[in-house]
Image (cartoon, coloured by chain):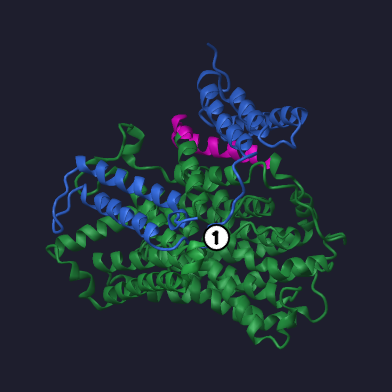
Chain colours: A blue, B green
Amino acid sequence: MNKLVQKDWPSALFILVIGLGAVLGSKSYTLGTLARMGPGYFPTLLGMLLILMGLLMLVGPRGDEVKTQGTWRGRLRPWGCTILGMLAFVLIGQYGGFAPAIFALILIAAFGDRANSTKTNVMLASAVTIVAVAVFHYGLQLQFPLFVWG
Amino acid sequence: MIENLMLGVQTAFQWENFLYAFIGVFIGNVVGVLPGIGSLAAISMLLPLTYGLNPVAALMMLAGLYYGTSFGGATTTILLNLPGTPTHAVVCVDGHPLAKKGRAGSAIFIAMFASFVGVSIGIALMATLSPLLTGVAFMFGPQEYFALMLMGLLAASTLTTGSPLKGVTSVVIGLLFGVVGTDVMTGVSRFDFGLSTLQDGVSLVVLATALFGIADVLTHAGKLGEGSLTTDSKINRNSVRPEKGEIKQSAKPIVRGATIGSALGILPGAGGTLAAFMSYAVEKKTSKTPERFGKGAMEGVSGPEAANSSAAITAFIPTLTLGIPGDAVMALMLGALMIHNITPGPAIMVEHPDLFWGLIISFWIGNFILLVLNIPLIGMWVKLLQVPYRIIFPIILLLISIGVYSANNNIYDVIMVLGVGIFGFLASRLGFQPAPMLLGFVLGPMVEENFRRSLLMAHGDLLVFFKQPLSAVFMSVSLLLLALVAFKRLRKTWAKPPQVQTA
């Protein structure tokens, strides 16, 4: 192992990208002077601070605070189901309505945990759909059509 | 003083206010007990529900949610060894061994009792101190505000757990989120990526539910196993009572804890977690039998629990009187006030005395309700504890989606919450905490405005922040905090022997 491997490269890179983005993004706004700052001054300053911190992370030792949070393997399923479930809520909410959107979100998300059986998921999704429609549509009068046709 | 408190009693007992305070406390208690949902997620998800209420009722409900979740979290901590919030982490150390010994009931009672006493002391302090602090706050100019906010942000990001450098970085990322939207001084729309919704800035609900809801689900889903109770003895209303002499034994730790908590709660940034840890350390040090700690010492539950509860109350003092929140929960409270067009700050006690004093009284009533509610309901909480996370998390996702949608009736906000949530999840995996990010976001526009205004008035002289005594003190503390971070980092570099690096 050489010295470079021990550095916290992912964190530093993450910060440098955001910092650079902020500095470059601010270029389209007037910078101004310290006495009369334009809209671009503060974000440019923040971006430069981030770049500085990213570089500091590469200079200093890797903090021992980085916890091992487990591997990525076996976690793709819950992540995928969470993301797909929310996207389904948006798409089906737009073209199908509130009720099917709830059902889809709960059903897809619940598949994220291996311990849930298909039967559990369908039952959970049905129950939550009924309760949520009662509470949010009829109870709190949420402006979201229950069903959209076509 | 007496008149003010009477006004508070009147306001807090108005039918609508009392009802929403009760709803907040109750939902908070239920949600707090459920494993995997903390105060922040609960408050963010229910924030849109309070938009339609009057500001007093809205804030009472949110505050109720806050201490309700905190109360419920203590139960989960003791029974499952799963702290829902970092403020309870230290309560695990002795609370859980107590549960293993079959004394869960009395540990829960003592925790509730300690919280209640801690809260009462915090409230007394808030009622006496706030008027004084308001007097000081009227002397604040833009440079004082900027310096105080800088100090608060640095304290919040460096004094918590984890790397201080990453904490400060999180704050700066939060400040950047705060830049999005129309610039108050020139009217230019910044970083809106061509989206009209972003012209008003990133919405607080979107950012908060993304960082604390979505990111949490991504962290825990498929990983948080079933909760298993470690105590064999049945817990019901009869077991929730102290054993002989326990209240007397806990009296001193509670008073000490509440004192530490009240003091730390006022300081921006320090907050409940630090107070709880400090109280634990103090109890262990002053105890004649320190070896009992970690194996089920009641003082290890009562002290920290009193400390974090009183800190939760006194944290409202800087939030309401100065408009400067000390932690992420307070940032959400501040955001809620601003949504209702109330600017927190020294004027709040003059312009909205009913809100201020009503809130103080409602804290006390709310915590009293909790104490009364929890004894008969403990059996129900124990059942609720066993609901597995695999059932809970899809429902959390639904509540977030509906909450975010309802704020603007805009379905595309749901996509934004998902995007920001994934960002927050990646950031927290890399060690960048979401709480300082939210704090930076809420304070961002105010930091920028006061920074620009100070320098505008001083014709660009950066030394303006050191010219007034108050702001000079805040700036010095900020610099001291930065020096501390730098020192810690350098020491780490020096302490590392070279052979380790080549190994």
**Count of numbered tags:** 1
- Which quadrant of the figure has residue B475? bottom left
Residue B433 lies, in percent from the top left, at: 48, 55
- Which quadrant of the figure has residue B300? bottom right
Residue A55 lies, in percent from the top left, at: 34, 56
Q: Residue at position x 87%, y 60% from top?
A: B232
* Vertical order, B80 against B414 (above or below): below
Q: Residue furthest bottom?
A: B288
Mark 1, residue position: B12
Front residue of B33/B340: it is B33
Q: Which residues are magenta?
A: B392-415
Residue B82 lies, in percent from the top left, at: 69, 58
Front residue of A126/B157: it is B157
Which type of secondary structure does the marked residue at label 1 adopt?
helix
Q: Main secondary structure of the magenta part?
A: helix
Q: Residue furthest right?
A: B233
Residue B437 lies, in percent from the top left, at: 43, 53
Q: Residue at position x 57%, y 64% from top?
A: B363
Q: Residues within 10 Å of mark 1 (few under 14, many from 20)?
A: many
The answer to whether one can see residue B346 in this image is no
Residue type highlighted by circle 1 = Ala
* Vertical order, B245 against B327 (above or below): below
Q: Which chain does the numbered disc 1 sit on?
A: B
